Amino acid sequence: MSWSAALGFAWIIAVSAVALIPYPRHRPYAIALLVLFPALLVLVALEHGPLWALAFLAAALSIYRYPARYLLRQAVHRLRGPR
């Protein structure tokens, strides 16, 4: 198994473990793992190709669905501008 795949699996397990912590205390850990995600995504894409990177992205979006939804709404709101 490559290092990028091992780190990706470890990241998914860590995110799942952090999700079990009660809400007020899990937020800093979740943000730290979210900050690490882009680097892992690029590493997986470089080593295994875009298909595996998309699979890793889908796995991350299934875990971070609410922050992703919030960021998507913010981006759409900024693109549309004031009404």
Image (spheres, rainbow, N blue to C red):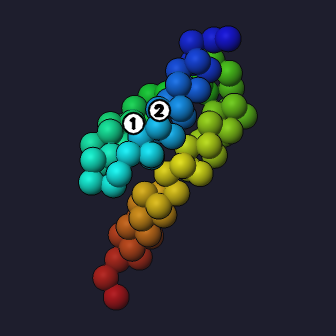
Label 1 environment density (alpha carbons within 10 Å; few <14, some 14–19, many ≥20)? some
- Residue extending furthest toward the right: 51
Tag of residue 73: none
Q: Position of residue 56 (x, y in %)?
A: 62, 36
Residue 2 position in % (x across, y down): 63, 11
SS under mark 1: helix
Pick the residue in front: 9 or 18: 18
Mark 2 and mark 1 in contact (Cβ < 8 Å)?
A: yes
For marks 1 and 2 on the same chain, the one whose residue lies earlier in the sequence: 2
Say which of 16 and 36 sits in front. Answer: 16
Q: Is residue 42 visible to us here?
A: no
Residue at numbered disc 2: 14
- At label 2, the amino acid type is Ala
Dot 2: within a 10 Å radius of its alpha carbon, few (fewer than 14), some, or many (20 or more) residues? some
In this view, 51 is above or below 72: above
**Residue 9 sits in which quadrant?**
top right
Q: Which secondary structure, mark 2?
A: helix
Q: Amino acid at mark 1?
A: Leu
Q: How far separated are the C-alphas under marks 1 and 2?
A: 8 Å
Image-quadrant location for residue 83: bottom left
Is 55 located above or below residue 81 in the figure?
above
Q: Is residue 45 above or below residue 72?
A: above
Which image quadrant: the N terminus? Answer: top right
Q: Is residue 79 left or right of residue 42?
A: left
Q: Position of residue 46 (x, y in %)?
A: 59, 21
Identify the residue under disc 1. Answer: 33
In the picture, residue 34 is in which quadrant?
top left
| Residue at x-position 68% and y-position 21% | 48
Q: Residue at x 69, y 31 (%)?
A: 52
Tell whether 15 sits left or right of 83: right
Which residue is pictured at 41% across the width and 40% down the height? 18
| Farthest residue, direction bottom | 83
